Image: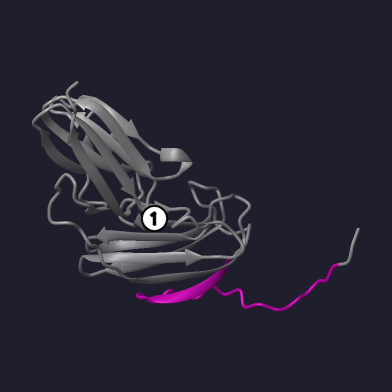
Amino acid sequence: MGTFSVRVEEIDDDAGELNFPGTTHGILYRTDRRHPYSGSAMHVYPFDLDDPMVLDVSLESHAFDAYLTVVDRATNNAIAENDDWGGSTNSRVVTELPAGRYEIWVAGYSHMASGEYVVNVAEGEIVRSERFVIGEPYLGYLGSGNRASIPRTGRRGDALEFEVTQTSTFEAYMSSIDVDSYLYLLDANGAIVAENDDYSFGLDAQLLVEGLEPGRYTLWATAYGAHEYGAYQVETSLQPTQSQ
């Protein structure tokens, strides 16, 4: 029991066209076309690229947990997707795309999602380190075209290679506001030495390997989801094991 107030107003429910680049707004209704992955109502915004570019698309809503998908119209396959970006319930995708025909799917994570939203599309920018050096911060980007297959995992990621010359303790920490970080350490034979997804109940990843023997190793930076794309940072250290 208690007091309450009700406000009613007329709203413009036309989703409108999305000029590229540009911003538009819309309203999802539960009777709209359904998203094939989440089952939520969705709106579709097609666009064409005459030249390769970095796409930066964001979706904001105070009414529902935003869910973005970028789709290749030629194959109808998802190229990139994002649910919660930067710890919020909004969504953002930054990805490299070749020339082609695409669609942006605006939806909610829950199949009951509905309400107002704003979607913005712009040209983005990607920053990468020139090379990987143990002990120096490495800036990388997980995109649709640069990932290689990680042996024995069924995943794809960025390969950061290094050499161990004496028995050592190895540490690696991967952080990102774009993706759910995932780290693998593989030896020269492709065997998995260590892996980590969510470190300390967060979405970053951390490895600590003591007694790492001399040899060639590959640190693989990837994401938990197959279509998670975005920037990340890896910090590493390699310290010789102290003899007793």
Q: Is most of the magenta stretch helix, strand or loop?
A: loop
The structure residue drawn at horizontal position 35% and vertical position 75%, both measured from the top left corner, is 21
The structure residue drawn at horizontal position 15% and vertical position 24%, both measured from the top left corner, is 213
Which residue is at the far right? Answer: 1
Picture layout, residue 214 above or below residue 129: above
Residue 229 percent location from the top left of the image: 33, 52
Residue 17 percent location from the top left of the image: 45, 75
Q: Which colour scheme is used?
A: one colour
The answer to whether residue 137 of the structure is visible from this angle is: yes
Picture layout, residue 92 above or below residue 134: below
Q: Nearer the viewer, residue 168 or 36?
A: 168
Which residue is at the far left? Answer: 165
Judge left or right: residue 86 versus residue 174: right
Given the image, on which type of amino acid does mark 1 rest? Ile
Judge left or right: residue 101 versus residue 69: left
Picture layout, residue 139 above or below residue 199: below
Q: Quadrant of residue 113?
A: bottom right
170 within the magenta span: no
The structure residue drawn at horizontal position 38% and vertical position 45%, both measured from the top left corner, is 204
Q: Nearer the viewer, residue 9 or 243?
A: 243
Q: Badge 1 local density, few (<14 within 10 Å), some, or many (20+)? A: some
Which image quarter is the C terminus in? top left
Judge left or right: residue 129 versus residue 175: left
Q: Quadrant of residue 65?
A: bottom right
Judge left or right: residue 44 versus residue 28: left
Residue 59 percent location from the top left of the image: 47, 65
Q: Nearer the viewer, residue 114 or 125?
A: 125
**The residue stretch that appears in magenta:** 4-27
Which residue was labeled with disc 1? 177
Picture layout, residue 49 above or below residue 81: below
